[in-house]
Amino acid sequence: MSQEIVKDGILCIPLYHGTATLFSDSIKQHGLGAVNPIKDHSVLSFMKEVFELCDRCFTNEPDWEASKFAPTWIIDQKNFFASANFQHGETYLTPSRSSAVGYALTNRFGSECLTETYRLFMLLKERKPLVLAENKLDEHPLVKLFSYRSEPVLVTVESVPLTYLASENGGPVELVINNLIEMLAVFRARESVGPRDILRSFGITLNYNFRLIKPLPPGTLTLEVLSVADEQNPYAW
């Protein structure tokens, strides 16, 4: 099984990254992971300002109190090693096509951080526009990006060297490889197909993700604009 996943230090299975057309030109020109849009657009600092206004305006409102945890974790860049990672700006890859498709379909701007920032901004714009204007947050350069019509994109990469990867939390890449081997062995016992077929055809979502630690050049990537009508979002409720 291990040789079907890694051979001579190269992954034998494809990896996927869910994003949006907003970033397609940059990926095609510079490669995947070469540009950090969260840093370049000062998303976190803007998100913090918008969040603080929301918290001031909507405090004790049940819908706000129930929805404020995720943006708080993003602003604090929390890393819950066993369950969730809210460190944004890095590039992450998954061996599950379904997981990447779900991420792309769920996050209209190709980034959870950017999409959540947009949600907070729109909450103020719709309910407290004067507060937004008084603080001049409606003049922030990032607001122009919110008007961009973006479509979901799936990036596929083949034959990625292990030296380009770490675990999602920045640990040894072998941790993810070993988890994959154990998980795929269970599916192999039920279905007589290889790892590539299991990861693509069975529509499984995985929390075994990789962090990209070196940019992948444009020639190693394929980009596919996803059809919202044809793709199934495993994260849709």
Image: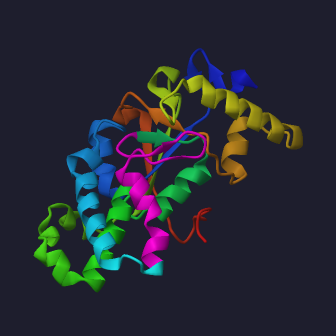
Q: Residue furthest top?
A: 8
Q: Work out whether residue 223 can be spotted.
A: yes
Toward which corner of the image does residue 225 lie, by quadrant?
bottom left
175 displayed left or right of 145? right
Circle count: 0
Residue 211 vs residue 104, the one in the foreground? 211
Residue at 46 percent across and 62 percent down: it is 69
216 displayed left or right of 158? left
Q: Quadrant of the N terminus?
A: top right
Q: Work out whether residue 112 can be spotted.
A: no
118 displayed left or right of 2? left
132 displayed left or right of 3? left
Toward which corner of the image does residue 6 lie, by quadrant?
top right
Residue at 20 percent across and 67 percent down: it is 143
Question: What are the residue bounds of the magenta stretch?
Answer: 63-90
Q: Position of residue 54 (x, y in %)?
A: 31, 72
Above-or-below relation of 72 to 3? below
Q: Position of residue 85 (x, y in %)?
A: 49, 45
Above-or-below relation of 5 to 223? above
Q: Position of residue 99 (x, y in %)?
A: 58, 52
Q: Position of residue 234 (x, y in %)?
A: 62, 62
Residue at 46 percent across and 41 percent down: it is 92
Above-or-below relation of 129 to 55? below
Based on the picture, tell me whether residue 72 belongs to the magenta stretch: yes
Q: Residue furthest front?
A: 60
